[in-house]
Amino acid sequence: HRILPDVAAARLYDTWKTLIPTLVDVQLGYTQRTVGKILKRPSTVLSACRSRKCAQRRTTLIGLFF
């Protein structure tokens, strides 16, 4: 038996299918700038908030290098 994806799975797939192509050039540029160099921890918090009114959130990001 083959189980077909439900609506939520199809929506998630479509979201990734749209997002991934936008990340390719950014990742390639980052790789070109950093290959063979020591990675340093950022000295400041990375944020897109332009005012102090943004809701505070903390996210842990695990980078996979291969």
Image (cartoon, rainbow, N blue to C red):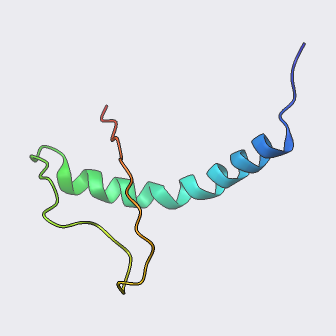
- Please state the horizontal and vertical placement of residue 65, each as a whole percent of the image: 30, 35
| Residue 63 in the image: above or below residue 14 | above
Image quadrant of residue 2?
A: top right
Residue at point 11% right, 52% down? 40
- Name the residue at the top extreme: 1
Tell me: 40 left or right of 1.
Answer: left
- Please state the horizontal and vertical placement of residue 12, each as a whole percent of the image: 70, 47
User: Which of these two is toward me, 50 or 2?
Assistant: 50
Residue at point 55% right, 52% down? 20
Tell me: 22 left or right of 39.
Answer: right
Image quadrant of residue 54?
A: bottom left
Q: Quadrant of the C terminus?
A: top left
User: Which of these two is toward me, 65 or 56?
Assistant: 56
Residue at point 86% right, 23% down? 3
- Name the residue at the bottom extreme: 51
- Please state the horizontal and vertical placement of residue 51, each as a whole percent of the image: 36, 87
| Residue 47 in the image: above or below residue 27 | below
Disc tally is: 0
